[in-house]
Image (cartoon, rainbow, N blue to C red):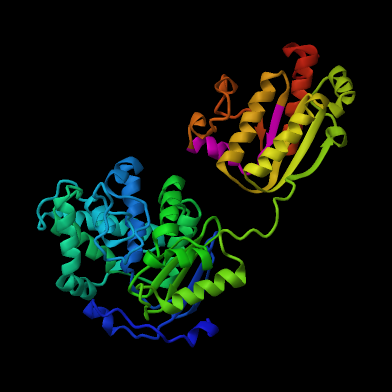
Amino acid sequence: MTMCAVERSGAVADYIPELTRVAPDGYGLSLCMHDGHVYSHGDSAASFTIQSIAKALTYAMVLTRLGPREVDRRIGVEPSGEAFNEISVDRARRPKNPMINAGAITAASLLLPQVRDLDDGAVDAAFDELVAFYSACAGRRLTLDEAVYRSEARTGARNRAIAYMLDSFGGMGAEPEAALDLYLRQCSLRVTTDDLAVIGCTLATGGVNPRTGRQVVSPEVAQRVLSVMTTCGMYDGAGDWVSSVGLPAKSGVGGGILAILPGQLGIGVYSPRLDAHGNSVRGIETCRHLSTDLGLHMFNVTRESRVTMRATYDIGEFGVGADWSERERGYLRTCRDRVRVYELQGDLTFSGAESAMRRLEADADDYDVAVVDISRTGVIDAVARTMVLTFKHSLEGRGLKAIVVDPDGVLRASVERHRYDQIVPDIVAPEALRGFDPTLPHVHGTMEDAVTDAEAFQLKQRYGRGEMFGGG
């Protein structure tokens, strides 16, 4: 911040009279980590109006409520290459994206279905729901700046013209004045950089607020919002931003910038002096320094994927279970090498999972049971979870056994969140899914339970079910 503090170019927004009253040299910075810890500096407690940063949250709200297919009928996702307040629509007369005013006003209208009267109490009700949603993202109750709201309402001729133009195209979900009123209210909510950082981290972590633990939006909605923020969030400066900073972001003429490193953290910056694009001058410079100094650029490739396999060994070092009969225990001592343990480590994504499953496939002639220990892995994405579960099912179809050590329950959580047939890639043959049990048998919290399960399988293969559990 010290390097950026000397930057005093730009000017506060002057087309909204109330914003001209803000102190031009305010400067705050907050970072919210994935575990909810917040680092703050400068004027991080100073509140300011969220302005266009609100567009990302309302977009998330309408996606959650209506689903992407319905929202895509009304709002595009293409960069406009124009200023935020341009009347920018595509050939289908849809606003080009939800991050420009036309798209944001349309998004607000979709929260007001069938409202044709500005005095209808539905506008107030919709705003209450919107505040509750924004507050859930921030982890605290946000409030309206009445003075800024009234100031925007008095001087919003261009936005009013955009609203009526969109209505003439048939793309609005509500009467133009009602949609515009809700839009102006959302822009006038007060936030701090701490709030922005927590909001950013909520989107970064798949829609889960890191401070409250609440799932505010689905991972799919968070992904869609981050994607559109990347290409459209900084208006006609988006290309320069992505190449130099490389973070999904959204700016507001109140001086705020929200930036996000997916999967890791959210950043909130405040400094009200703006450049020609309507973005905070200091805010952009601060984010550039953070991206460069901390290596936050999302396309930064520091190394090739590391080998995921930490170790592999048989269960000879584990004692035979005491619950088996002497006959069974004697047999189990002779085949400890037919149970192989594969310890995985690090974040498990497609490339790492592919490497690990390929190794297990190559070794399949050397074991009766493969124990996959994922207790040392960090993040396991949906594709990797799918690959592990599919390989497990494939082995069982060949008369072998796959057992997973999963103390944190990441595989079970994945199946509970998605139908299995929806998360399996198209490359998996449908016959591989026949008989799949979504209760995930043979997934255990400890290695000891996994070894016992492996022994039970070996005894069943040798003696049949009658003597499997120490019957004689």
Please give the count of numbered marks on the rendered protein.
0
- Residue 86 place in picture, x, y as percent: 26, 64
Q: Is residue 292 left or right of residue 308?
A: left
Quadrant of the rendered structure where residue 444 is?
A: top right
Report the front residue among 207 and 303: 303
At 70% from the left edge and 19% from the top edge, which residue is drawn?
A: 398
Q: Is residue 347 left or right of residue 359?
A: left
- Residue 404 place in picture, x, y as percent: 68, 34
- Residue 85 place in picture, x, y as percent: 27, 66
Residue 282, compared with residue 307, is above or below; it is below
Which quarter of the figure is the C terminus placed in?
top right
Report the front residue among 14 and 169: 169
Q: Is residue 338 left or right of residue 14?
A: right
Asked if one can make out residue 273 in the rendered structure from this viewpoint, the answer is: yes
| Residue 407 belongs to magenta span | yes
Report the front residue among 186 and 302: 302
Quadrant of the rendered structure where residue 442 is?
A: top right
Quadrant of the rendered structure where residue 462 is?
A: top right
Q: Hey, which residue is sitting farthest front in the picture?
A: 91
- Residue 205 place in picture, x, y as percent: 51, 54
Extent of the magenta region: 402-417
Residue 18, compared with residue 210, is above or below; it is below
| Residue 170 belongs to magenta span | no
At 47% from the left edge and 60% from the top edge, which residue is drawn?
A: 248
Residue 31, compared with residue 431, is above or below; it is below
At 46% from the left edge and 57% from the top edge, which residue is drawn?
A: 202
Asked if one can make out residue 215 in the rendered structure from this viewpoint, the answer is: no
